[in-house]
Amino acid sequence: MGTSRWYHRPRLMPLNPTLPEWWNWELSFTAHAELRMEQRGVTEVDVRAMLERATRYEPSVVEGRFMIHAAHQQLPWIVIVEPDVDARLLVVVTPYEVSQ
């Protein structure tokens, strides 16, 4: 998955039996994600807040990745994540604003 950094992700969402096991794993941000975050004007704190307030998730078109639906500044965003089962990390691939 290339170069990445990982951080502790606090458990702020209530446990819900419908959430996947990887939902509360520590986060890791790829270099690509960090670049896109800077280009799109969002910080790690913003992405963490989006994930904490996520409304739903679904499989992405890329196998093994998921689209997390959230909001940022009252606009819809999607955060693409990929669970790394071996490392038990939730890798943030990229966040982006949804065009309306």
Image (cartoon, rainbow, N blue to C red):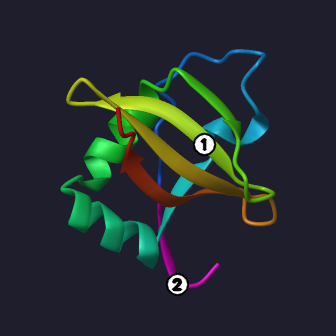
Q: Residue 67 carries which label?
A: 1
Q: Is 32 in the magenta?
A: no
**In screen coordinates, is 78 left or right of 46?**
right
Residue wearing tag 2: 3
Count of numbered tags: 2
Q: What element carries label 1?
A: strand
Q: Which residue is drawn at 35% across and 32% down?
A: 100
User: Mark 1 or 2 closer to N-term?
Assistant: 2
Q: Give SS at disc 2.
A: loop
- Quarter-of-image position of residue 75: top left
> Residue 12, position in %: x, y?
46, 26
Residue sitting at x 60%, y 42%: 67
Nearest to the observer: residue 13 or residue 51: 51
Disc on res. 89:
none
Give the quarter of the figure containing the N terminus.
Answer: bottom right
Residue at the image point whose x is 69% and y is 15% from the top: 16
User: Which residues lie in the magenta part?
Assistant: 1-7
The location of residue 81, given as percent across then percent down, is: 60, 52
- Between disc 1 and disc 2, the foreground one is 1
> Which amino acid, by three-letter code, is at mark 1?
Met
Dot 1: within a 10 Å radius of its alpha carbon, few (fewer than 14), some, or many (20 or more) residues? many
What's the amino acid at mark 2? Thr
Q: Which residue is drawn at 55% across and 51% down?
A: 80
Looking at the image, residue 49 lies above or below residue 27 = above
Residue 3 is inside the magenta segment: yes
